[in-house]
Image (cartoon, coloured by chain):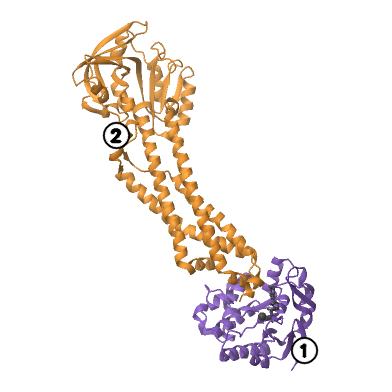
Amino acid sequence: MTVIKASNLTKTYNPDKIPVRALRGVDLAIEKGEFTAIVGPSGSGKTTLLNIIGGLDRPTAGEVEVGGKDISQLSDNQLIDFRKDNIGFVFQSYNLIPVLTAKENVEFVMVLQNRPKAERDKRAESLLTAVGIAEKMDKRPSELSGGQQQRVAVARALASKPAFILADEPTANLDSESTAGLLDMMATMNKEENITFVFSTHDQRVIDRARRVVTLVDGKIVSDERR
Amino acid sequence: MLFQIAWRNIWRNKVRSLVVIGSVLIGVWSILFIVAFSSAMVGGYVKNAIQNETSHYQLHHPNFVEDKDVKFNIDNPAAVLAKVSETKSVKAATLRTVVNGMVRSSRGARGIIIRGIDPAQESLVTGFDSKLIEGKYFTEGRKNEIIISQKIAEKLKLKLRKKVVLQFQDLNKDIVAGAFRIVGIYKTGNTIFDESMVAVKRMDLNELMAKEGIAHEVAVLLDKKEDLVPTGNALKVSFPNLLVENYREISPETQLYESQIDISATIFTTIFMLALIFGIINTMLMAVLERNRELGMLMAVGMNKGKVFTMIVLETLLLGIIAAPIGLFLGWATIQYFGGQGIDLGAFSASMEQFGLSTKIYTELSTKYYWSLAISVLITALLGSLYPAWKAIGLRPVEAIRKI
Ligand SMILES: Nc1ncnc2c1ncn2[C@@H]1O[C@H](COP(=O)(O)OP(=O)(O)O)[C@@H](O)[C@H]1O
Ligand SMILES: [Mg+2]
């Protein structure tokens, strides 16, 4: 089953001044259960691509279908709602609300979805257990290490039961031990729960863990290998 | 959870929030005090005027007010008084004979208003007996006693037990005169009033005029000022042939002063609210800009614009909701304290007395004003939060997040 289908995406920043062509005709289909790395040098368009398939930004031309739905026609507020129910995000940093505890952060998206308290409690606890920081549940982000924060971010991203998780350089700020730990956790989730991950990186150790590697150079896909 | 987030967000930058809370608190506190002080000062004047001078209502022959001719007296005053006294909310009423005349001593003469009063009733209405600073009140059965003010005593170099001559035109336009003995000296605190009024018994004055039982004025004191309008309407219905006037109509400056209370309260409040709104906009804008990335992240993960907007508005309102009650309480406590204790304006008393202002100010403030100030603060906080909240929802998540 195809969860994301991007066709002939182009993105040009500053079309009126000095145009930057960040994407130049990208076609990409992501299947359910894939564990995909988008790789490429800095400035190759990884973030731009993830933002567009995540409904955070609009392409200059081309189409994005998520779960069979064309999201290019949605208004800003419709997009917010769409993201809330369909896409899990993990950013490089600033993933969490600083005034909420780990558990409250995970609950937060479920609050936005109006899920009942009992369900939120149960799910937040089981997700935090799954990402391996159950004992830090009541800590605020500032009391957690970078790796622990990213684990909470993954739990938060999963909480809304999204179709897939987009992670833009999730390990960029982590040391190698935390990087390995986070990837182990993500790989386990992928294998055991069949959760679809798409993440960008330029870290070779992370690339080695991916089962599909899409390489971008200058806004074009230059290779796409499954292994 | 939105509320919880908003509440905790306030305490992220404790110093800044405390500065806002502190300024709202101090602002509310001081504004209450200023308004209470100025309205007590002015309200005191109005109270004094009602107590000493005008009462709540006066009834006259319709022409008397224009032309203080003795012939414009009230028909059958005893019956009028009886009916007035029975009217609802009337606490006390009294009759007066009022003539313009001269008071003459061996040292000189002055134009004066002579009030012929019924001593017992008069003290119920104006408490005139309590204004005596020397001598005593009228004694029943004694003829031709007079009470003059300290001011006139000074001007005419008069003392207790001295004799003065009162002179005026009677009903036939003949000049009549009578000798009166000073039994008391009064002082109301309003110099202008004191300089113009002497009091004798109405019976004595009527006798000089050779007309028994006449009266020009009915002064009416009510249970409370709130009854003013209904009672006035009732009196007007009962006495269609008399002119019924309340203290504001009798003494227009009381009305001016009363409206001054509201105007100055409004001005103070408006200035404060303007300062407050700019303070709030500034603070909340800073809070929004600082949290740019976080707000972008929230919108990225599905917090819609309405919720983001509400969160910022809530944060602002909470600052007001914390500050306002404390400020209101401190203001109330201060007003209560000085309401009992009074603030002595000794240094300015001489000049203030001249205008009938009390020299000791007992602060008080109507509940209505506390409420309106509380509501104004909240509305101002709400208005002040709109622009920052609007800025927050204008953020584009991609741009906010790109900086991450
Ligand atoms: N908002 C923007 N305005 C102008 N240029 C941009 C903007 N965002 C990204 N770019 C440019 O687009 C290109 C792709 O950027 P990006 O997608 O961030 O690449 P990557 O994530 O692979 O480093 C870069 O040349 C970058 O400078
Ligand atoms: Mg990038």
Query: What residue lies at 38% left-to-right and 19% top-to-bottom?
Result: B217
Which image quarter holds the C terminus of chain B? bottom right
* Quarter of the displayed picture in which ligand 1 can be seen: bottom right
Q: Position of residue B41 (x, y in %)?
A: 37, 39
Checking the image for residue A223, the label placed there is 1
Which image quarter holds the N terminus of chain B? bottom right
Chain shaded orange: B
Query: B344 and B376: which one is in front?
Result: B344
Seen in the picture, residue A184 relative to A24 is either above or below; the reply is below
Q: Amino acid at mark 1?
A: Ser
- A103 with respect to B123 (left or right): right
Q: Does label 1 lie on the same chain as label 2?
A: no
Query: How far separated are the C-alphas under marks 2 and 1?
Result: 98 Å
- Give the letter of the chain under mark 1: A
Task: Mark 1: give few (<14), some (14-19) or many (20+) Cα within 10 Å.
Answer: few
- For the residue labelled by badge 2, is the local secondary structure a helix, a strand or a loop? helix
Seen in the picture, residue B61 relative to A205 is either above or below; the reply is above
Query: B71 and A169: which one is in front?
Result: A169
Q: Amino acid at mark 2?
A: Ala
Asked whether mark 2 lies closer than 8 Å to ligand 1, one says: no
* Residue behind mark 2: B350
Asked whether mark 1 lies closer than 8 Å to ligand 1, one says: no
Q: Quadrant of residue B101?
A: top left
Query: What residue lies at 48% left-to-right and 48% top-to-bottom?
Result: B271
- Give the letter of the chain under mark 2: B
Q: Quadrant of residue B347?
A: top left
- A28 with respect to B137 (left or right): right
Chain shaded purple: A
